[in-house]
Image (cartoon, rainbow, N blue to C red):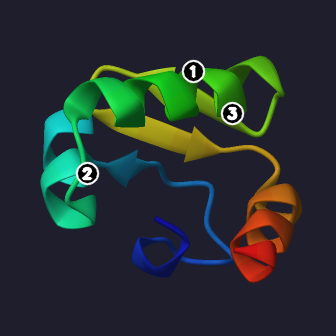
Amino acid sequence: MLRKTNTNSEAPLYATHEVLSLELGTAREVVSRILKEFERLGWIKLGRGKIYLLQRSELEQLAQVK
């Protein structure tokens, strides 16, 4: 998800949970659950077909741990 966004932009990532699940090779429900948790933590904001990155640094930290 981070690779698909511009680091200096406030523009959202245009992607559905379905598309992300296909790219990641997992179920849409799993993607939805994880994105909802990221939203609860304040890292992202979900919109219809859009994902706004609010705390990019937190997501980058998580990506490096994995």
The structure residue drawn at horizontal position 56% and vertical position 41%, both measured from the top left corner, is: 52
Amino acid carrying label 3: it is: Phe
Identify the element where label 1 is drawn: helix
Within 10 Å of the Cα at label 1, are there few (<14), some (14-19), or many (20+) other Cα atoms?
A: some
From the top left corner, tell me how far across and down residue 1 is, in percent. Answer: 46, 64
The local secondary structure at tag 2 comes to helix
Tag 1 residue:
36
Q: Are marks 2 and 3 in contact (CB under 8 Å)?
A: no
Which of marks 1 and 2 precedes in the sequence? 2
Q: Position of residue 24 (x, y in %)?
A: 27, 62
SS class, disc 3: helix
The residue at the point 77 percent across, 61 percent down is 56
Distance of label 2 from label 1 (alpha carbons): 14 Å
Q: Which residue is mark 2?
A: 20
Q: Which residue is mark 3?
A: 38
> Disc 2 or 3, which lies upstream in sequence?
2
Mark 2 to mark 3 CA distance (whole Å): 15 Å
Q: State left or right for residue 19 relative to residue 31.
A: left
Determine whether 33 is above or below 65 in the image: above
On-image quarter of the C terminus? bottom right
Q: Disc 2 marks which amino acid? A: Leu
Residue displayed at 46% across by 39% down = 51
Q: Amino acid at mark 1?
A: Lys
Image vertical order of residue 2 relative to residue 36, above or below: below
Q: Nearer the viewer, residue 10 or 13?
A: 13
Q: Are marks 3 and 1 in contact (CB under 8 Å)?
A: yes
Mark 3 crowd level (few <14, some 14–19, many ≥20, 10 Å Cα)? some
